[in-house]
Amino acid sequence: MTRQKVKMAFIENESSRKATYKKRKRGILKKANELATLCGVPVGVIIDSPYDLTPEVWPSREDMDNVLSQWQRLPVMDRTKKMLNQESYLKQSISKATETCKKLTKENKELEMKEVMFDCLSGKTSPPRIEKSDLRGCGNVIEQYLRNLNRRIEILSKNDGASSSSVHAAATTSVAMPIVELGSSSTAFCDMIRQQQIQSNMNQNVRGLDLNQQQW
Amino acid sequence: MAKKSKGRQRITMAKMENESNLQVTFSKRRSGLFKKASELNTLCGADIAVVVFSPGGKVYSFGHPNVENVLNRFKNINQPPLNQNNNMRFNEARPNDAIRVMNDFLTQVMNDLELAKKKNEELKKIRKNSKMPVNWWEDPVEELDLAHAKEFKGLLEKLKSYVTDEASKHFQAIFPQPNFYGGSSSGAPFRDGGYINPNLDPSERRMFNVNAYYNQNMYPPNYPLPYGNNNYAGGFVPEYSLNYMHGFNQYRNQNQNLNFKEEGISENECHQDGLPPHL
């Protein structure tokens, strides 16, 4: 909706500044009104600028008086607990934004590493081809996944006694896969998996990655 | 999959009915109002005070230069104005340096945040698009049955060990020279109190207790031990600092059962051609 991002700095051009002031003042009062109405709470705004002779008061001087008396009734500590000025407000905003940004970057890295992991599993890439700087992150993601898997296995194993039929049914279909033969000759990681995918596709096998035939 | 929200809807200008929605709305709109107030001051140099009471009766306020100062101006509004030139009151209109710097910094952080959000969306899109139903292992773990979960686990563990091997090779490349690592608390199985002489015959080096390599200051947490690769003389990674000690110790205790083929593997067997070792 905005055409250009406004730079958050004092507007040097006087007429621009005055125009912006008028628009934004109108906007703030509108927002204050919406907040007060939608949430049914007392709100008071005072704006004092070189462009007005006297400070602008909203909603009205009378209402502002009421807000002020309510304000005065509160103990000083309650008043100041959530009190902010530019400095404290900006500090707060900065730290919140940094926090969110950190979390997101971390999540992004994990998502990336997860892709690498899946790519290895499906044969699109292999460990030697992973970016050196990503190896550690990838290792971590794999570990995390293993932890979840173990938890899942634990849960399922416990329920096995309770004889959940769906689990058994799935287990029997899995048994249809060929049994592994360890000790067979090894070939490159990728090729092996690719081969199996081709094979299983040919066999119309739903299981794309024939894990039991891994010969590494 | 949860239905996405309807998006921006027109809202009736009356007190909201749903209690919890009201709370959320209050929180968001109050925050937005303060932001606007901050911007008004930054851009135009106006002084401002905003006082808001929450549905629960708590009070939030924002003001520049500070709330009390501006509130007082209102209180004195009915008193005859001092004979001041209007402009003089606002000599200090330009934000001071600290505020300017913070605004710049905030802008920067917001930009980074914006980028991170975009990237996040892209990555999720990629995952969505590249997922093949055939690849059951890409389903959420919670949907796997026992047999699949076990298969997957086995495979992942192998993958993990390969990734580890690659990583250990990489470390070797970065740190061909061993550093003197003082303060090794794992005893002194090395000669010269911790210094590993790169000129030692490899077979001699292999006689060192592999566990002794794991100086607490050296290893990152949760990092699987490379098996059989005693060329690890250069494995000191100073950047993995003392902070990791706790995690590392936990890890060590879990993994004593890993098979270190200490004597059995010659150098030739260690991943020099990128192929997995014979099992």
Image (cartoon, coloured by chain):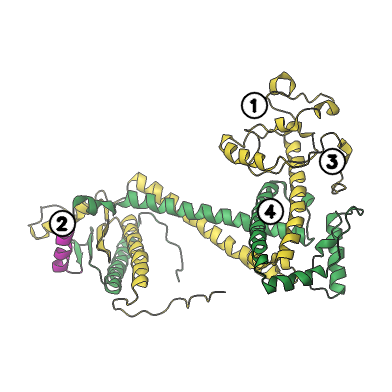
Colour used to depict chain B in the structure image: yellow
Tell which of B206 and A41 is nearer to you: B206
**Which residue does the numbered mark 1 point to in the structure image?**
B184
Colour used to depict chain A in the structure image: green
Secondary structure found at label 1: loop
**Which residue does the numbered mark 4 point to in the structure image?**
A142
- Marks 2 and 1: same chain? no
Residue B149 on the magenta segment: no
Q: Chain of mark 1?
A: B
- Marks 3 and 4: same chain? no
**Which residue does the numbered mark 3 point to in the structure image?**
B270
The type of residue carrying mark 4 is Ile
The type of residue carrying mark 1 is Ser
Alpha carbon distance from label 4 to label 2: 58 Å
Q: Is residue B89 left or right of residue A152?
A: left
Secondary structure found at label 4: helix
